[in-house]
Amino acid sequence: MPSPPSAADHEGDPSVGAETPEPASAQERTIGGRDLTEWRSAAGRRLVAVVAAVSAALAGLLRWSRANLALVVTVLVGGVLFLVLEALAAEVYEAVVERDGLQALDQPVLDAAVRLRTPARDAAVTAFTDLGSTVGMTSIVVVCTVTLALVRRSWTPVVLASVAAAGSVLMTVLGKDLVGRTRPPSTLAVPPLESSPSFPSGHTLNATVLIGVLAYLVLLGMTRLWMRVLVGTVAVLFVLAMGLSRVYLGHHWLTDVVAGWLLGLGWLVAVVTAHRVQLTLRDRDPETGRTGPSS
């Protein structure tokens, strides 16, 4: 029988001693030095415990893994919560409008935007705001998520982006139907004009959620500080610029945009939290043969 290869047999072989790349599951659980499966707050630990119990109860019925069920359960709970909050926001909006409180902020900001307009600026801002349209944002998300999925050989980008997009669209449609607010006067808007209700700003809400979740996906496994800062800065500037572009063009009131930012941020937090819960329970799943860090 041939003897087992010795270290000398591999001398000069570059594959020996080379660092083994981290599997996709390991890359998806960290941002910088932060392990996303570690829950530092008592509220976070309680959330994981409750979702784990519910998922374990459902796992036997649906024959899904506890971790995947945890993602679904957390997203559904978060979705219901933010839909309730959106309904409450609509009620608060109606109460404020009856006292003309919004006019004190919205109209002066729109008037200032009108004074800043020039043909060149209008064309540039219109081209940018088109990135936040259904076609523009869908194109960005599809290209980015497919690229990330192929590079990392993981379905996580596709799943998270799909969940984020579905919730974002639902909140936009429901919010517009609940409030039915009229857009700024067409005489103060830059064509092409839009006819759907104004509250909340769909461009702003969708950009907040989708660019936010793309930034989160890119940050997963990223260790270099300057790269994390760059990704975060670009994402924040894009979202802020998208919202302000809607006011500049006279397509939305400022309060529509602020509502889009807040609702979008809330849903983004729900999606990211759901992913963290899924990672935590996957790491503890005895079927994986691993035990994760204590939460």
Image: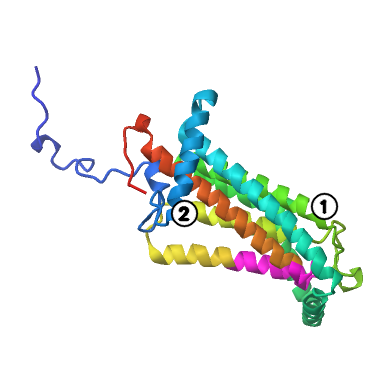
Q: Is residue 257 above or below residue 282?
A: below
Which one is nearer the viewer's eye here, 107 or 82?
82
| Residue at 84 percent of width and 74 percent of height | 100
Question: Relative to 275, is 105 above or below?
Answer: below
Q: Which of the labelled discs sits on residue 141, or is there none?
A: none
Q: Amino acid at mark 2?
A: Ala
Q: Which residue is mark 2?
A: 43
Rendered image: mark on residue 177:
1
Question: How far from the left and from the top, in percent, is residue 125?
Answer: 73, 69
Q: Position of residue 61 (x, y in %)?
A: 54, 24
- Range of magenta residues: 237-255
The local secondary structure at tag 2 comes to helix
- Callout 1: helix, strand or loop? helix
Residue 42 position by quadrant:
bottom left
Q: Quadrant of residue 280?
A: top left
For the N terminus, the image quarter is top left
Amino acid type shown at disc 1: Asp
Q: In the picture shown, does residue 100 fall above or below 26?
A: below
Q: Is residue 55 left or right of residue 263?
A: left
Q: Are marks 2 and 1 in contact (CB under 8 Å)?
A: no
- Dominant SS of magenta comes to helix
Q: Residues within 10 Å of mark 2 (few under 14, many from 20)?
A: few
Q: CA distance from mark 2 to mark 1?
A: 34 Å
Residue 159 lies in magenta, yes or no? no
Residue closest to the eye, 223 or 185: 185
Q: Position of residue 40 (x, y in %)?
A: 39, 56
Q: How many marks?
A: 2
Q: Which residue sits at x=53%, y=40%? A: 71
Q: Earlier in the sequence, mark 2 or mark 1?
A: 2
Q: Position of residue 138 (x, y in %)?
A: 67, 49
| Residue 230 vs residue 97, the one in the foreground | 97
